[in-house]
Image: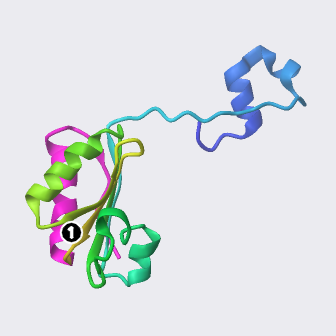
Amino acid sequence: MAGMTTRELLEKLYHQDYEKLKGKKLRMTRVRVPGKEVCLAHVLSPSQSCIYQNLGLHIGVHEGEDHTGEAIGMIRFTPWEAVVVAADIAVKSANVEIGFMDRFSGSLILTGGLTEVQTAVEEVVKFFKEVLGFKTCAVHKS
């Protein structure tokens, strides 16, 4: 349904009811049905401290740690609970730390040396593609 106009969407969803609904205020709700997908895999080269602060990697269990010069790996999954498996694969495949993990949004942030973070992200994507049969994206680096 991506790329459809509101009219085309309403006609598709409501068929004959379109004329009755035309001109009325309607509330459209988007619902995302999780599939088996790694939708983001990105490695940020060693960053400045402001990046870590904006990601909240300087608070909580990381309070007082200086991550300046470390790389950041960001991965996002559906279904969201897959992040737990991804974190396990990441820490077993390279010397990285989990900076953030959220099983309600499927987000995983890894920190560590550039080579280690890149290896961890690549191994996670490879495992999800080859072993679990997920649709995966390419690993990007900036």
In the visual, does 130 lie left or right of 61? left
Q: Residues within 10 Å of mark 1 (few under 14, many from 20)?
A: many
Amino acid type indicated by mark 1: Val
Residue beneath the point at 21% across and 51% down: 87
Q: How many marks?
A: 1
Residue beneath the point at 21% across and 38% down: 133
What secondary structure is marked by label 1? helix
Q: Which residues are magenta?
A: 114-142
User: Residue 125 location in percent, x, y?
Assistant: 22, 53
In the visual, does 137 lie left or right of 27? left
Name the image quarter holding the C terminus.
Answer: bottom left
User: Residue 139 location in percent, x, y?
Assistant: 28, 63
Q: Which residue is mark 1?
A: 117
Please state which of residues 8 and 39 is positioned toward the viewer in this rendering.
39
Residue beneath the point at 14% across and 58% down: 91
In the visual, does 6 lie left or right of 126? right
Report which quarter residue 69 is drawn in. bottom left
User: Residue 77 location in percent, x, y?
Assistant: 34, 46
Report which quarter residue 115 is drawn in. bottom left
